Protein backbone atom coordinates (compact mmCIF):
# COMPACT_ATOMS: atom_id res chain seq x y z
CA UNK A 1 0.00 0.00 0.00
CA UNK A 2 1.17 3.51 -0.78
CA UNK A 3 0.69 6.52 1.48
CA UNK A 4 1.55 10.18 1.24
CA UNK A 5 3.15 11.53 4.40
CA UNK A 6 3.20 15.28 4.97
CA UNK A 7 4.86 17.26 7.73
CA UNK A 8 2.78 20.40 7.70
CA UNK A 9 3.58 24.03 8.41
CA UNK A 10 6.05 24.68 5.58
CA UNK A 11 5.53 27.79 3.47
CA UNK A 12 5.40 26.95 -0.24
CA UNK A 13 7.58 29.07 -2.47
CA UNK A 14 8.77 28.91 -6.07
CA UNK A 15 7.39 27.78 -9.42
CA UNK A 16 5.38 24.75 -10.43
CA UNK A 17 4.44 23.54 -13.91
CA UNK A 18 0.94 22.26 -14.51
CA UNK A 19 0.37 19.11 -16.58
CA UNK A 20 -2.09 18.57 -19.42
CA UNK A 21 -5.76 18.51 -18.40
CA UNK A 22 -7.03 15.16 -17.18
CA UNK A 23 -10.62 15.73 -18.25
CA UNK A 24 -9.52 16.84 -21.72
CA UNK A 25 -7.13 13.89 -22.08
CA UNK A 26 -9.77 11.32 -21.13
CA UNK A 27 -12.06 12.72 -23.86
CA UNK A 28 -9.42 13.30 -26.52
CA UNK A 29 -7.87 9.82 -26.25
CA UNK A 30 -11.13 8.01 -27.11
CA UNK A 31 -11.99 10.77 -29.62
CA UNK A 32 -8.95 9.60 -31.63
CA UNK A 33 -10.96 6.48 -32.51
CA UNK A 34 -13.01 8.71 -34.81
CA UNK A 35 -9.98 9.20 -37.07
CA UNK A 36 -9.11 6.79 -39.82
CA UNK A 37 -5.48 7.74 -39.32
CA UNK A 38 -2.76 8.38 -36.76
CA UNK A 39 -3.23 10.98 -34.03
CA UNK A 40 -0.40 12.40 -31.94
CA UNK A 41 -1.53 13.83 -28.63
CA UNK A 42 0.93 16.12 -26.87
CA UNK A 43 1.07 17.47 -23.29
CA UNK A 44 -0.51 14.27 -22.04
CA UNK A 45 -0.68 14.02 -18.24
CA UNK A 46 0.92 10.84 -16.85
CA UNK A 47 -1.88 9.81 -14.53
CA UNK A 48 -3.73 6.59 -13.73
CA UNK A 49 -6.88 7.48 -15.70
CA UNK A 50 -4.85 8.04 -18.86
CA UNK A 51 -3.02 4.75 -18.36
CA UNK A 52 -6.30 2.87 -17.87
CA UNK A 53 -7.92 4.43 -20.90
CA UNK A 54 -4.88 3.71 -23.08
CA UNK A 55 -5.13 0.03 -22.09
CA UNK A 56 -8.82 0.02 -23.05
CA UNK A 57 -7.96 1.57 -26.42
CA UNK A 58 -5.35 -1.12 -27.07
CA UNK A 59 -7.83 -3.82 -26.19
CA UNK A 60 -10.24 -2.66 -28.90
CA UNK A 61 -7.49 -2.62 -31.52
CA UNK A 62 -6.07 0.91 -31.47
CA UNK A 63 -2.28 0.89 -31.58
CA UNK A 64 -1.14 3.21 -28.77
CA UNK A 65 2.49 4.24 -28.37
CA UNK A 66 3.32 6.26 -25.28
CA UNK A 67 6.51 8.28 -25.65
CA UNK A 68 8.46 9.60 -22.72
CA UNK A 69 7.89 13.24 -23.72
CA UNK A 70 4.22 13.30 -22.64
CA UNK A 71 3.10 12.30 -26.10
CA UNK A 72 0.77 9.50 -27.10
CA UNK A 73 0.43 8.23 -30.64
CA UNK A 74 -2.85 6.50 -31.48
CA UNK A 75 -3.40 4.61 -34.71
CA UNK A 76 -7.12 3.81 -35.07
CA UNK A 77 -6.99 2.46 -38.62
CA UNK A 78 -7.49 -1.14 -37.58
CA UNK A 79 -10.02 -1.12 -34.75
CA UNK A 80 -11.09 -4.74 -34.48
CA UNK A 81 -13.56 -4.71 -31.67
CA UNK A 82 -16.41 -2.42 -30.56
CA UNK A 83 -16.71 -3.99 -27.11
CA UNK A 84 -14.63 -2.45 -24.31
CA UNK A 85 -13.44 -4.89 -21.71
CA UNK A 86 -14.90 -4.55 -18.18
CA UNK A 87 -11.60 -4.87 -16.32
CA UNK A 88 -9.78 -2.16 -18.28
CA UNK A 89 -12.43 0.54 -17.91
CA UNK A 90 -14.45 -0.24 -14.81
CA UNK A 91 -12.65 2.35 -12.67
CA UNK A 92 -12.76 5.14 -15.23
CA UNK A 93 -15.73 7.43 -15.49
CA UNK A 94 -14.73 8.66 -18.94
CA UNK A 95 -15.05 5.16 -20.41
CA UNK A 96 -18.49 6.34 -21.53
CA UNK A 97 -16.83 8.33 -24.31
CA UNK A 98 -16.03 5.02 -26.01
CA UNK A 99 -19.78 4.59 -26.42
CA UNK A 100 -20.36 7.74 -28.48
CA UNK A 101 -17.24 7.48 -30.58
CA UNK A 102 -17.52 3.75 -31.45
CA UNK A 103 -21.21 4.11 -32.18
CA UNK A 104 -20.53 7.11 -34.42
CA UNK A 105 -17.78 5.46 -36.45
CA UNK A 106 -18.88 1.81 -36.52
CA UNK A 107 -22.61 1.86 -35.73
CA UNK A 108 -22.16 -0.27 -32.63
CA UNK A 109 -20.59 -0.15 -29.19
CA UNK A 110 -20.55 -2.14 -25.97
CA UNK A 111 -19.12 -0.41 -22.96
CA UNK A 112 -19.31 -1.28 -19.24
CA UNK A 113 -21.33 1.06 -17.05
CA UNK A 114 -18.87 3.80 -16.04
CA UNK A 115 -16.87 3.77 -12.81
CA UNK A 116 -14.78 6.68 -11.48
CA UNK A 117 -15.14 8.70 -8.30
CA UNK A 118 -18.11 7.83 -6.19
CA UNK A 119 -19.89 10.88 -4.83
CA UNK A 120 -23.52 10.04 -5.30
CA UNK A 121 -25.65 8.97 -8.20
CA UNK A 122 -23.88 9.58 -11.50
CA UNK A 123 -26.58 9.08 -14.13
CA UNK A 124 -26.00 8.89 -17.89
CA UNK A 125 -29.61 9.46 -18.94
CA UNK A 126 -28.66 12.59 -20.92
CA UNK A 127 -26.05 10.67 -22.90
CA UNK A 128 -28.67 8.04 -23.71
CA UNK A 129 -31.30 10.63 -24.53
CA UNK A 130 -28.98 12.30 -27.04
CA UNK A 131 -27.78 9.12 -28.73
CA UNK A 132 -31.31 7.73 -28.92
CA UNK A 133 -32.60 10.97 -30.47
CA UNK A 134 -30.01 10.49 -33.22
CA UNK A 135 -31.36 7.03 -33.99
CA UNK A 136 -29.43 4.64 -31.75
CA UNK A 137 -30.99 1.76 -29.86
CA UNK A 138 -29.51 1.44 -26.40
CA UNK A 139 -29.91 -1.39 -23.89
CA UNK A 140 -28.27 -1.91 -20.55
CA UNK A 141 -27.67 -5.62 -19.89
CA UNK A 142 -25.38 -7.37 -17.42
CA UNK A 143 -23.61 -4.12 -16.52
CA UNK A 144 -22.89 -3.29 -20.17
CA UNK A 145 -24.32 -0.43 -22.22
CA UNK A 146 -25.05 -1.81 -25.68
CA UNK A 147 -25.67 0.67 -28.48
CA UNK A 148 -26.50 0.07 -32.15
CA UNK A 149 -27.52 2.23 -35.08
CA UNK A 150 -27.82 1.46 -38.79
CA UNK A 151 -27.34 5.17 -39.27
CA UNK A 152 -27.25 8.21 -37.00
CA UNK A 153 -29.11 11.30 -38.12
CA UNK A 154 -28.46 14.79 -36.78
CA UNK A 155 -31.20 16.41 -34.73
CA UNK A 156 -31.77 19.05 -32.02
CA UNK A 157 -30.97 17.84 -28.52
CA UNK A 158 -31.76 19.99 -25.50
CA UNK A 159 -29.92 18.74 -22.42
CA UNK A 160 -32.08 18.76 -19.26
CA UNK A 161 -28.97 19.31 -17.15
CA UNK A 162 -25.68 20.88 -18.14
CA UNK A 163 -23.51 17.80 -18.50
CA UNK A 164 -19.89 17.73 -19.62
CA UNK A 165 -20.03 14.01 -20.34
CA UNK A 166 -23.28 14.11 -22.32
CA UNK A 167 -22.13 17.13 -24.35
CA UNK A 168 -18.87 15.46 -25.38
CA UNK A 169 -20.43 12.04 -25.96
CA UNK A 170 -23.13 13.42 -28.25
CA UNK A 171 -20.52 15.51 -30.07
CA UNK A 172 -18.44 12.34 -30.65
CA UNK A 173 -21.41 10.38 -31.98
CA UNK A 174 -22.46 13.26 -34.24
CA UNK A 175 -19.19 13.52 -36.20
CA UNK A 176 -20.33 10.99 -38.80
CA UNK A 177 -24.10 11.50 -38.43
CA UNK A 178 -26.10 12.60 -41.44
CA UNK A 179 -26.88 16.33 -41.40
CA UNK A 180 -26.57 18.69 -38.45
CA UNK A 181 -26.74 17.83 -34.75
CA UNK A 182 -27.45 20.75 -32.42
CA UNK A 183 -26.72 20.40 -28.70
CA UNK A 184 -28.55 23.03 -26.68
CA UNK A 185 -27.83 23.81 -23.02
CA UNK A 186 -24.38 22.34 -23.71
CA UNK A 187 -21.57 22.37 -21.15
CA UNK A 188 -18.96 25.11 -21.71
CA UNK A 189 -16.02 23.65 -19.77
CA UNK A 190 -12.53 24.16 -21.27
CA UNK A 191 -12.24 20.41 -21.92
CA UNK A 192 -15.41 20.51 -24.06
CA UNK A 193 -13.77 23.20 -26.19
CA UNK A 194 -10.48 21.28 -26.28
CA UNK A 195 -12.20 18.13 -27.53
CA UNK A 196 -14.01 20.11 -30.24
CA UNK A 197 -10.75 21.78 -31.31
CA UNK A 198 -9.07 18.36 -31.55
CA UNK A 199 -11.90 16.96 -33.67
CA UNK A 200 -11.81 19.98 -35.97
CA UNK A 201 -8.07 19.51 -36.54
CA UNK A 202 -8.94 16.01 -37.79
CA UNK A 203 -11.50 17.39 -40.23
CA UNK A 204 -14.70 17.43 -38.14
CA UNK A 205 -17.12 20.34 -38.39
CA UNK A 206 -17.93 21.37 -34.81
CA UNK A 207 -18.98 24.96 -34.17
CA UNK A 208 -19.96 26.82 -31.01
CA UNK A 209 -18.02 24.82 -28.39
CA UNK A 210 -17.57 27.09 -25.37
CA UNK A 211 -21.11 28.47 -25.79
CA UNK A 212 -24.30 26.69 -24.80
CA UNK A 213 -25.22 25.78 -28.38
CA UNK A 214 -22.92 23.43 -30.29
CA UNK A 215 -23.56 22.54 -33.95
CA UNK A 216 -21.95 19.49 -35.50
CA UNK A 217 -22.23 18.92 -39.24
CA UNK A 218 -21.57 15.30 -40.17
CA UNK A 219 -18.57 14.47 -42.38
CA UNK A 220 -17.48 11.39 -44.36
CA UNK A 221 -14.12 10.74 -42.75
CA UNK A 222 -11.64 12.12 -40.21
CA UNK A 223 -7.91 11.96 -40.85
CA UNK A 224 -5.07 11.89 -38.32
CA UNK A 225 -3.40 14.95 -36.80
CA UNK A 226 -1.28 16.35 -34.00
CA UNK A 227 -2.83 18.15 -31.05
CA UNK A 228 -1.62 19.65 -27.75
CA UNK A 229 -3.88 19.22 -24.73
CA UNK A 230 -4.70 22.34 -22.66
CA UNK A 231 -3.27 22.73 -19.14
CA UNK A 232 -5.28 21.29 -16.26
CA UNK A 233 -7.59 23.89 -14.72
CA UNK A 234 -8.15 21.83 -11.57
CA UNK A 235 -4.49 21.01 -10.97
CA UNK A 236 -3.74 24.74 -11.40
CA UNK A 237 -6.42 25.65 -8.86
CA UNK A 238 -5.17 23.02 -6.43
CA UNK A 239 -1.67 24.55 -6.41
CA UNK A 240 -3.14 28.05 -6.12
CA UNK A 241 -5.05 26.98 -3.02
CA UNK A 242 -2.00 25.16 -1.64
CA UNK A 243 -0.02 28.39 -1.98
CA UNK A 244 -2.75 30.33 -0.17
CA UNK A 245 -3.16 27.88 2.72
CA UNK A 246 0.57 27.90 3.52
CA UNK A 247 0.88 31.69 3.29
CA UNK A 248 3.25 31.00 0.42
CA UNK A 249 4.37 32.69 -2.77
CA UNK A 250 3.96 30.37 -5.75
CA UNK A 251 3.93 30.97 -9.48
CA UNK A 252 1.91 28.35 -11.30
CA UNK A 253 3.14 28.06 -14.86
CA UNK A 254 1.87 26.58 -18.13
CA UNK A 255 -1.72 27.56 -17.40
CA UNK A 256 -4.50 29.46 -19.17
CA UNK A 257 -5.34 32.30 -16.73
CA UNK A 258 -8.77 32.79 -18.36
CA UNK A 259 -9.77 29.31 -17.11
CA UNK A 260 -8.87 30.34 -13.57
CA UNK A 261 -11.07 33.45 -13.26
CA UNK A 262 -13.55 32.01 -10.76
CA UNK A 263 -10.72 30.82 -8.51
CA UNK A 264 -8.73 34.05 -8.87
CA UNK A 265 -11.86 35.98 -7.93
CA UNK A 266 -12.45 33.92 -4.76
CA UNK A 267 -8.82 34.06 -3.65
CA UNK A 268 -8.77 37.82 -4.23
CA UNK A 269 -11.98 38.19 -2.20
CA UNK A 270 -10.12 36.36 0.60
CA UNK A 271 -7.40 39.04 0.36
CA UNK A 272 -4.83 36.81 -1.26
CA UNK A 273 -2.51 38.63 -3.67
CA UNK A 274 -3.06 37.17 -7.13
CA UNK A 275 -1.39 38.35 -10.33
CA UNK A 276 -1.41 36.83 -13.81
CA UNK A 277 0.68 36.85 -16.98
CA UNK A 278 0.06 35.27 -20.36
CA UNK A 279 0.57 31.71 -19.10
CA UNK A 280 1.00 31.94 -15.35
CA UNK A 281 -0.68 32.97 -12.14
CA UNK A 282 1.18 34.02 -9.00
CA UNK A 283 -0.47 33.55 -5.60
CA UNK A 284 0.89 35.21 -2.46
CA UNK A 285 -0.97 34.16 0.62
CA UNK A 286 0.70 35.98 3.53
CA UNK A 287 -1.35 37.62 6.32
CA UNK A 288 -4.84 36.77 7.54
CA UNK A 289 -7.15 35.50 4.83
CA UNK A 290 -10.88 36.22 5.07
CA UNK A 291 -13.57 33.57 4.82
CA UNK A 292 -15.82 33.65 1.76
CA UNK A 293 -18.94 31.87 0.54
CA UNK A 294 -18.59 29.63 -2.50
CA UNK A 295 -21.20 28.02 -4.72
CA UNK A 296 -20.12 25.44 -7.28
CA UNK A 297 -21.48 25.92 -10.79
CA UNK A 298 -20.81 24.67 -14.32
CA UNK A 299 -18.07 26.64 -16.12
CA UNK A 300 -17.42 29.59 -15.97
CA UNK A 301 -18.63 29.28 -12.36
CA UNK A 302 -16.52 28.00 -9.47
CA UNK A 303 -15.74 24.32 -10.31
CA UNK A 304 -17.07 21.48 -8.19
CA UNK A 305 -13.70 19.76 -8.68
CA UNK A 306 -12.10 22.52 -6.57
CA UNK A 307 -14.78 22.48 -3.88
CA UNK A 308 -13.02 20.07 -1.45
CA UNK A 309 -9.72 21.97 -1.76
CA UNK A 310 -11.53 25.26 -0.99
CA UNK A 311 -13.11 23.69 2.11
CA UNK A 312 -9.62 22.82 3.35
CA UNK A 313 -8.50 26.42 2.79
CA UNK A 314 -11.56 27.84 4.56
CA UNK A 315 -10.48 25.94 7.71
CA UNK A 316 -7.58 28.39 7.93
CA UNK A 317 -9.31 31.73 7.23
CA UNK A 318 -10.87 34.34 9.50
CA UNK A 319 -14.59 33.89 10.02
CA UNK A 320 -17.08 31.38 8.67
CA UNK A 321 -17.41 30.33 5.04
CA UNK A 322 -20.42 28.63 3.46
CA UNK A 323 -19.89 26.17 0.63
CA UNK A 324 -22.84 25.17 -1.51
CA UNK A 325 -22.42 22.20 -3.84
CA UNK A 326 -24.87 22.41 -6.73
CA UNK A 327 -23.35 19.91 -9.17
CA UNK A 328 -22.97 16.64 -7.22
CA UNK A 329 -25.46 15.57 -4.58
CA UNK A 330 -23.00 13.87 -2.24
CA UNK A 331 -19.62 15.50 -2.51
CA UNK A 332 -18.96 16.14 1.17
CA UNK A 333 -17.88 12.62 2.19
CA UNK A 334 -14.31 13.78 2.70
CA UNK A 335 -15.37 16.16 5.46
CA UNK A 336 -15.30 13.39 8.07
CA UNK A 337 -11.64 12.89 7.16
CA UNK A 338 -10.94 16.64 7.40
CA UNK A 339 -12.49 16.54 10.87
CA UNK A 340 -9.82 14.02 11.94
CA UNK A 341 -7.34 16.82 11.29
CA UNK A 342 -9.36 19.16 13.53
CA UNK A 343 -11.61 20.89 11.00
CA UNK A 344 -14.78 22.42 12.39
CA UNK A 345 -17.40 21.93 9.66
CA UNK A 346 -21.15 21.36 9.75
CA UNK A 347 -22.83 19.76 6.76
CA UNK A 348 -26.51 20.14 5.99
CA UNK A 349 -27.52 18.57 2.67
CA UNK A 350 -25.64 20.35 -0.07
CA UNK A 351 -24.22 23.03 2.23
CA UNK A 352 -21.12 22.96 4.41
CA UNK A 353 -20.49 25.63 7.01
CA UNK A 354 -16.76 25.90 7.62
CA UNK A 355 -15.35 27.66 10.67
CA UNK A 356 -12.03 29.32 9.98
CA UNK A 357 -9.20 29.45 12.53
CA UNK A 358 -9.35 25.65 12.93
CA UNK A 359 -6.38 24.23 14.78
CA UNK A 360 -5.39 21.59 12.24
CA UNK A 361 -3.09 18.86 13.54
CA UNK A 362 -1.66 15.87 11.68
CA UNK A 363 -3.48 12.53 11.73
CA UNK A 364 -3.99 9.34 9.75
CA UNK A 365 -6.66 9.92 7.05
CA UNK A 366 -7.92 8.31 3.85
CA UNK A 367 -8.79 9.86 0.50
CA UNK A 368 -12.40 9.05 -0.40
CA UNK A 369 -12.06 10.23 -4.01
CA UNK A 370 -9.65 12.15 -6.24
CA UNK A 371 -10.42 15.74 -5.20
CA UNK A 372 -11.09 14.66 -1.61
CA UNK A 373 -7.50 13.40 -1.65
CA UNK A 374 -6.31 16.81 -2.88
CA UNK A 375 -8.24 18.50 -0.05
CA UNK A 376 -6.51 16.28 2.50
CA UNK A 377 -3.13 17.16 1.00
CA UNK A 378 -3.96 20.87 1.32
CA UNK A 379 -5.18 20.53 4.91
CA UNK A 380 -2.09 18.47 5.78
CA UNK A 381 0.20 21.17 4.34
CA UNK A 382 -1.35 23.59 6.84
CA UNK A 383 -1.59 21.18 9.79
CA UNK A 384 0.90 20.94 12.65
CA UNK A 385 2.81 17.67 12.64
CA UNK A 386 2.59 14.60 10.47
CA UNK A 387 -0.39 13.51 8.37
CA UNK A 388 -0.50 10.15 6.62
CA UNK A 389 -2.92 9.95 3.70
CA UNK A 390 -4.13 6.53 2.53
CA UNK A 391 -5.92 5.53 -0.70
CA UNK A 392 -3.32 7.45 -2.66
CA UNK A 393 -4.45 5.67 -5.82
CA UNK A 394 -7.34 8.13 -5.98
CA UNK A 395 -4.95 11.08 -6.03
CA UNK A 396 -2.85 9.37 -8.71
CA UNK A 397 -5.93 9.18 -10.94
CA UNK A 398 -5.69 12.91 -11.58
CA UNK A 399 -2.44 14.45 -10.28
CA UNK A 400 0.90 13.76 -11.92
CA UNK A 401 3.79 13.45 -9.42
CA UNK A 402 2.01 15.52 -6.79
CA UNK A 403 4.60 14.82 -4.11
CA UNK A 404 7.45 15.87 -6.40
CA UNK A 405 5.73 19.05 -7.50
CA UNK A 406 4.83 20.10 -3.95
CA UNK A 407 8.24 18.96 -2.70
CA UNK A 408 9.94 21.27 -5.21
CA UNK A 409 7.98 24.15 -3.63
CA UNK A 410 9.33 23.33 -0.17
CA UNK A 411 6.64 21.02 1.20
CA UNK A 412 7.86 18.23 3.47
CA UNK A 413 6.07 15.46 1.60
CA UNK A 414 6.98 11.90 0.66
CA UNK A 415 5.39 8.75 -0.68
CA UNK A 416 5.93 5.64 1.37
CA UNK A 417 5.15 1.95 0.77
CA UNK A 418 3.90 -0.02 3.74
CA UNK A 419 2.48 -3.49 4.12
CA UNK A 420 -1.34 -3.41 4.21
N1 LIG B 1 -26.14 14.37 -14.95
C1 LIG B 1 -27.39 13.84 -15.17
N2 LIG B 1 -27.56 13.01 -16.25
C2 LIG B 1 -26.55 12.72 -17.10
C3 LIG B 1 -25.28 13.27 -16.88
C4 LIG B 1 -25.11 14.10 -15.79
O1 LIG B 1 -28.32 14.09 -14.42
O2 LIG B 1 -26.78 11.98 -18.07
C5 LIG B 1 -25.96 15.27 -13.81
C6 LIG B 1 -24.97 14.69 -12.80
O3 LIG B 1 -25.61 13.86 -11.87
C7 LIG B 1 -24.39 15.95 -12.18
C8 LIG B 1 -24.40 16.97 -13.32
O4 LIG B 1 -25.31 16.46 -14.28
O5 LIG B 1 -25.25 16.39 -11.17
C9 LIG B 1 -23.07 17.20 -14.00
O6 LIG B 1 -22.52 15.98 -14.46
P1 LIG B 1 -21.53 15.89 -15.71
O7 LIG B 1 -22.13 14.96 -16.69
O8 LIG B 1 -21.16 17.26 -16.15
O9 LIG B 1 -20.26 15.17 -15.07
P2 LIG B 1 -19.30 14.16 -15.76
O10 LIG B 1 -19.16 14.47 -17.20
O11 LIG B 1 -19.63 12.78 -15.36
C10 LIG B 1 -17.18 15.65 -15.52
C11 LIG B 1 -15.83 15.49 -14.89
C12 LIG B 1 -15.96 15.53 -13.37
C13 LIG B 1 -16.62 16.85 -12.97
C14 LIG B 1 -17.96 17.02 -13.71
C15 LIG B 1 -18.60 18.38 -13.46
C16 LIG B 1 -14.76 14.10 -16.52
C17 LIG B 1 -14.20 12.77 -16.84
N3 LIG B 1 -15.27 14.22 -15.30
O12 LIG B 1 -17.93 14.54 -15.06
O13 LIG B 1 -14.64 15.53 -12.89
O14 LIG B 1 -16.88 16.86 -11.58
O15 LIG B 1 -17.75 16.89 -15.12
O16 LIG B 1 -17.76 19.40 -13.86
O17 LIG B 1 -14.72 15.01 -17.31
C18 LIG B 1 -12.89 15.09 -11.39
O18 LIG B 1 -12.10 15.42 -12.28
O19 LIG B 1 -12.55 14.90 -10.20
C19 LIG B 1 -14.28 14.87 -11.75
C20 LIG B 1 -15.11 14.16 -11.00
Image (cartoon, helix red, strand yellow):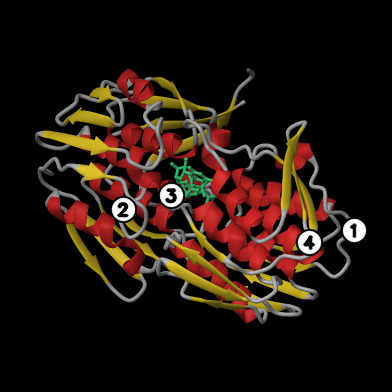
Q: Is residue 70 visible?
A: no
Label 2 vs label 3: CA separation?
Answer: 29 Å
**Residue 277: image location, x then y, percent:** 29, 74
Q: Nearer the viewer, residue 95 or 363?
A: 95
SS at circle 3: loop
User: Dots 4 and 2: beta carbons under 8 Å?
Assistant: no
**Residue 87: image location, x then y, percent:** 77, 37
Label 1 vs label 2: CA separation?
Answer: 44 Å
**Residue 344: image location, x then y, percent:** 22, 22
Q: Which residue is mark 2?
A: 240
Residue at 58 percent of width and 38 percent of height: 116
Count the marks: how many? 4
Q: Which residue is mark 4?
A: 64
Q: Earlier in the sequence, mark 4 or mark 2?
A: 4
Residue at 40 percent of width and 69 percent of height: 211
Q: Residues within 10 Å of mark 4 (few under 14, many from 20)?
A: some
Residue at 65 percent of width and 61 percent of height: 134
SS at circle 2: helix
Q: Nearer the viewer, mark 4 or mark 3?
A: 3
Q: Nearer the viewer, mark 1 or mark 4?
A: 1
Q: Nearer the viewer, residue 241 or 94?
A: 94
Q: Which residue is mark 3?
A: 161
User: Dots 4 and 3: beta carbons under 8 Å?
Assistant: no
Q: Quadrant of the N terminus?
A: top right
Label 1 vs label 4: CA separation?
Answer: 14 Å
Q: Earlier in the sequence, mark 1 or mark 3?
A: 1
Q: Residues within 10 Å of mark 3 (few under 14, many from 20)?
A: few
Q: Nearer the viewer, residue 166 or 3?
A: 166
Which quadrant of the structure image shows residue 145?
Answer: top right
Q: Which residue is mark 1?
A: 80
SS at circle 4: strand
Amino acid sequence: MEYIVINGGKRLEGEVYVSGAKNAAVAIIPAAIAANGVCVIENLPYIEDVEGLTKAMTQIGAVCTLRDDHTLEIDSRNITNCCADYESVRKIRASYYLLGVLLGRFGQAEVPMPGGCNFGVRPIDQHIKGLTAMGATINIEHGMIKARADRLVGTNIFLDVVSVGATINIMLAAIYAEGVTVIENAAKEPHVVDTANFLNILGARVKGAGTDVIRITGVQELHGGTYTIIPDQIESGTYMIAAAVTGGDVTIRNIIPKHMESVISKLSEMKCQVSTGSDYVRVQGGGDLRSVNVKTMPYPGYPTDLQPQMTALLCKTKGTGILTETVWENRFQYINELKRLGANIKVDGRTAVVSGDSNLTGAQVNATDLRAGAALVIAALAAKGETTIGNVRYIDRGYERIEQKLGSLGADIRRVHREA
